[in-house]
Amino acid sequence: MLKSYAAIILILGCFGNTAQAGDPCPIHVSINDLGSPDWLDNSALLNALESRQIWIGISYENLDDGILLTRVYAGSPAAEAGLLEGDIVSDIEGRPTTESETFERLNIGEAVVFSIDRDGQRLDALVTIGGADPVPLAIVQQLGKTECRTADIAQADAEMDRAVMARLFTESRAFRCDDAHKVLEPLMEPFQSDTVYFVRGSRRLLLTMPYYGTACISTLSLDGENLNDSAVSEVIEQVISDYVRERFENP
């Protein structure tokens, strides 16, 4: 799981204060982190960030004596270590998982022992903590502070993701900062478009929502102290404001 989050999906909310006739709420937005293009080293880009976000790849429920794994994501550090849904993790490196600081003490690249109970059998699994991009999670968190939207981290569709990524760059491998949302339109109908695609480059970030908007910003503008509520809100509103307005006008 990403740090202390017990679930990837968060309840978020709508623009404005009072829902009108034909209540449009909830307005849903998915954030799809496409990572970096294959000619860049995504791990190196993440390791260079001041803002760090650990990635284990689990969803869980809290129990009195540990955490119950409700999902283990394919290809994640947890999956590679052999963790399974239904495992109960009692401690990590001897620290009880019932303590809130247990996950906060983990570091990217660190190999730690997860002590688990699997069908009554005590087992140990060595998990190497991975890194995740902090920006998509920051966007989801910020949207959660609004009133009537719902948001989540999009589930990957590999074929669609490849098609989207192929259209987001010019022949010179530059981001399509002006028209990324327009060049994605042939891939989907307007009613299918509720996803913001996020791509990390070596110096800039691209966020785009098909049919609605695109934002290109410098990496430093959403890193370290700049990764704050105000900066995150400003950039995501550039991308989704027309979408939200349309949902209110045509619920």
Image (cartoon, rainbow, N blue to C red):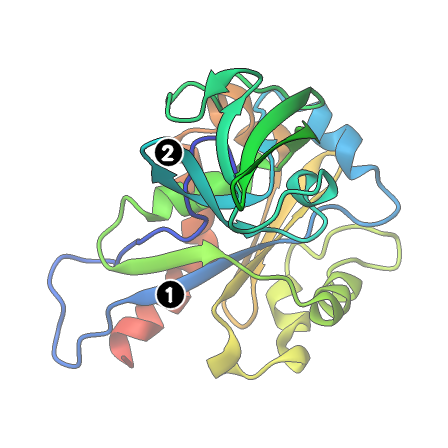
For this rendering, which residue is in front, 120 or 249? 120
- Is residue 52 left or right of 173 when viewed as pictured? left
Q: Tell me, yes or no, if residue 27 can be seen here.
A: yes
The percent position of residue 172, horizontal first and vertical second, equals: 88, 53
Residue 169 position (above or below residue 130): below
How much space separates mark 2 and mark 1, taking CA atoms?
20 Å
Residue 209 position (above or below residue 101): below
Which element type, helix, strand or loop, lies under badge 1? strand
Name the residue beneath numbered marker 2.
Answer: 229
The percent position of residue 62, horizontal first and vertical second, equals: 36, 38
- Is residue 217 left or right of 148 when viewed as pictured? right
* Amino acid at dot 1: His
Q: Tell me, yes or no, if residue 179 can be seen here.
A: no
Mark 2 nearby-residue class (10 Å; few <14, some 14–19, many ≥20): some
Mark 1 nearby-residue class (10 Å; few <14, some 14–19, many ≥20): some
* Amino acid at dot 2: Asp
Name the residue beneath numbered marker 1.
Answer: 28
Q: Quadrant of residue 130?
A: top right
Mark before the other along the chain sequence, 2 or 1: 1
Residue 237 position (above or below residue 29): above
For this rendering, which residue is in front, 159 or 197? 159
- Is residue 11 left or right of 119 when viewed as pictured? left
- Is residue 2 left or right of 14 when viewed as pictured? right
Residue name at image x 38 percent, y 60 percent: 241
For this rendering, which residue is in front, 173 or 127? 127
Residue name at image x 37 percent, y 34 percent: 230
Residue name at image x 27 percent, y 56 percent: 13
Which element type, helix, strand or loop, lies under badge 2? helix
Q: Quadrant of residue 243?
A: bottom left
The percent position of residue 153, horizontal first and vertical second, equals: 51, 54
